[in-house]
């Protein structure tokens, strides 16, 4: 439901240039939902959300929209939108925490692999520590997805409210995609490990069947596997490569999430201001 074909008087004239811009951005994000998940596609979705929220921020400055949101009969819907904005901010903070924790663990492990202090036993311990940290991150993300509340449907007569509801819905969808990308299917890592264990050689191309998070998990599980020889430097080199790629992926996602967070705060402030008028 990208475009609104019948708008009430509570929404600006269809001729306003912001309306087709809003519809186009929303349609673009909706069409990208079916795309395969990758760090590049997620970064693109986060960038698209930023543009969409910038457009919404401009729409909320229009007098007719401000009047509609401050109308007492719409107070219930605005309260609901404020609740929705809090849920989105909570999910944003969950994403930030997950990325920050994984980045710190990734940087620490890269440093330990380079130094190799304490020998093989110490390295194995640190690898397990990293994977346990990943399990904690996955658990937090799965809990966040399970506890989220679905946004209720709004009266189609309340066009400006319906527009904001649609924006919250697509934002929630992108967060869910990102959470699944970071946590991955429960069996993804060991599935990749199994394929690698049964092959004669270990190649980056095979590990890269999945995303950067799952690829790093698989490479590290392979490194600590008792079935692999300790002298196999190819496995360790590949693990280092996957960790480096994971760190770059996290950096891109962190920038997108932080930028979106600022926009979510701005929209929430606008809603509060309109509600208090």
Image: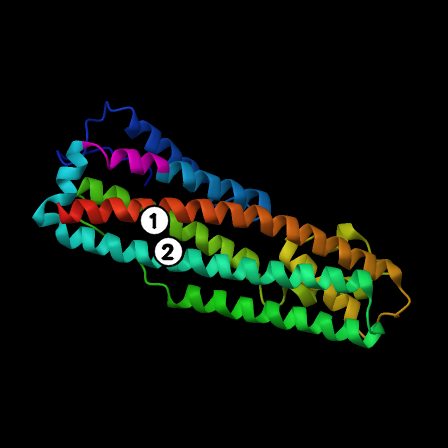
Q: Which of marks 2 and 1 is in front?
A: 1
Between 190 and 127, the one lying in front of the other is 127
Whether 61 is among the magenta residues is yes
Q: Residue 209: image x %, image y %?
A: 69, 53
Q: Residue 236: image x %, image y %?
A: 82, 61
Q: Residue at x 82, y 70 (%)?
A: 117
Q: Residue 86: image x %, image y %?
A: 32, 57
The residues colored magenta run: 54-62
Q: Residue 56: image x %, image y %?
A: 31, 38
Task: Give the prevailing secondary structure in the magenta stretch.
Answer: helix
Which image quadrant for residue 144? bottom left
Q: Mark 1 points at which residue?
A: 265
- Say whether residue 49 is left or right of residue 136: left
Dot 2 surroundings within 10 Å: few (below 14), some, or many (20 or more)?
Answer: some
Q: Residue furthest right?
A: 231
Please tell me whether residue 149 is drawn above or below residue 166 in the rendered image. below
Q: Do the residues labelled 2 and 1 touch (CB within 8 Å)?
A: yes
Between 265 and 18, the one lying in front of the other is 265
Q: Which residue is drawn at 80% across and 66% down?
A: 197
Please tell me whether residue 268 is drawn above or below residue 182 in the rendered image. above
- Say whether residue 30 is left or right of residue 216: left
Q: Name the residue under label 2.
A: 89
Dot 1 surroundings within 10 Å: few (below 14), some, or many (20 or more)?
Answer: some
Q: Distance between the residues labelled 2 and 1?
A: 8 Å
- Tell how many labels: 2
Which quadrant is home to the C terminus? Answer: top left
Q: Residue 200 carries which label?
A: none
- Say whether residue 137 is left or right of residue 144: right
- Say whether residue 45 is left or right of residue 85: right
Which image quadrant for residue 113? bottom right
Residue 2 seen in the current view: yes
């Amino acid at each position: 439901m990208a475009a609104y074909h019948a708008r009430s008087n509570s929404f600006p004239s269809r001729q306003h240039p912001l309306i087709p811009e809003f519809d186009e951005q929303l349609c673009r994000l909706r069409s990208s939902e079916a795309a395969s998940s990758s760090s590049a596609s997620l970064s693109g979705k986060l960038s698209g959300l930023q543009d969409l929220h910038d457009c919404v921020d401009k729409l909320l400055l229009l007098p007719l929209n401000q009047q509609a949101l401050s109308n007492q009969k719409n107070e219930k819907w605005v309260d609901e939108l404020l609740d929705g904005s809090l849920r989105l901010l909570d999910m944003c903070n969950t994403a930030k925490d997950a990325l920050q924790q994984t980045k710190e663990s990734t940087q620490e492990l890269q440093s330990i692999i380079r130094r190799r202090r304490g020998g093989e036993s110490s390295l194995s311990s640190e690898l397990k520590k990293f994977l346990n940290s990943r399990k904690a991150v996955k658990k937090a993300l799965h809990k966040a997805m399970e506890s989220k509340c679905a946004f209720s449907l709004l009266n189609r007569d309340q066009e400006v409210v319906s527009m904001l509801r649609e924006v919250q819905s697509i934002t929630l969808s992108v967060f869910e995609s990102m959470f699944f990308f970071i946590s991955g299917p429960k069996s993804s890592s060991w599935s990749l490990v199994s394929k690698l264990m049964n092959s004669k050689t270990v190649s980056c191309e095979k590990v890269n069947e999945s995303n950067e998070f799952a690829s790093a998990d698989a490479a590290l599980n392979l490194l600590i596997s008792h079935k692999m020889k300790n002298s196999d430097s190819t496995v360790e080199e590949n693990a280092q490569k996957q960790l480096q790629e994971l760190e770059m992926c996290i950096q891109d996602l962190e920038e997108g999430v932080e930028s979106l967070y600022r926009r979510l705060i701005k929209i929430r402030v606008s809603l509060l201001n309109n509600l208090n008028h």
